[in-house]
Image (spheres, grey):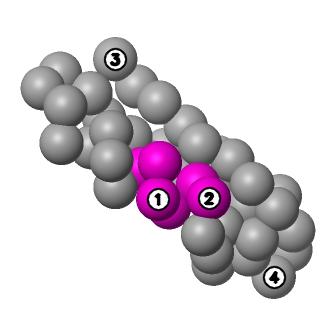
Amino acid sequence: MNLLFVCSENRLRSPTAEAIFQNYPGVEAISAGTNADAETPVIALQSL
């Protein structure tokens, strides 16, 4: 199962969720932010 957690700046909420769920067996979790100045902008994930 692939999970994408999104919040505005990708600084607290979505990275926290990613950290929790990435330890579940069979789960691939990543996080991104909607703002252009986010740690990992959603647009950067388009190549995945």
Q: Mark 4 or mark 3, which is nearer the start of the sequence?
A: 3
Q: What residue would you read off at disc 3? A: 1
Q: What residue would you read off at disc 1? A: 16
Q: What is the secondary structure assignment of the residue under circle 1?
A: helix
Q: Residues within 10 Å of mark 1 (few under 14, many from 20)?
A: few
Q: Position of residue 42 (x, y in %)?
A: 71, 54
Q: Mark 1 or mark 4, which is nearer the start of the sequence?
A: 1
Q: Mark 1 or mark 3, which is nearer the start of the sequence?
A: 3
How many marks do you count on the picture? 4
* Residue 17 vertical position relative to residue 32 in the rendered view, above or below: above
Please state which amino acid type lies under the numbered disc 1.
Answer: Thr
Q: What is the secondary structure assignment of the residue under circle 3?
A: loop
**What residue range appears in magenta?**
13-18
Please state which amino acid type lies under the numbered disc 2.
Answer: Arg
Q: Position of residue 47 (x, y in %)?
A: 56, 49
Please state which amino acid type lies under the numbered disc 4.
Answer: Asp
Instruction: Assess whether mark 3 and mark 2 are in contact (beta carbons under 8 angstroms).
Output: no
User: At 47% from the left edge and 48% from the top edge, which residue is drawn?
Assistant: 17
Q: Mark 2 or mark 4, which is nearer the start of the sequence?
A: 2
Q: What residue would you read off at disc 2? A: 13
Report, in whole angstroms, how far the alpha carbon at label 3 lies from the one at label 4: 28 Å
Q: What residue would you read off at disc 4? A: 37
Please state which amino acid type lies under the numbered disc 3.
Answer: Met
Q: What is the secondary structure assignment of the residue under circle 2?
A: helix
Q: Main secondary structure of the magenta part?
A: helix
Instruction: Assess whether mark 4 and mark 3 are in contact (beta carbons under 8 angstroms).
Output: no
Q: Residues within 10 Å of mark 2 (few under 14, many from 20)?
A: some
User: At 12% from the left edge and 26% from the top edge, which residue is drawn?
Assistant: 25
Q: Nearer the viewer, mark 3 or mark 1?
A: 1
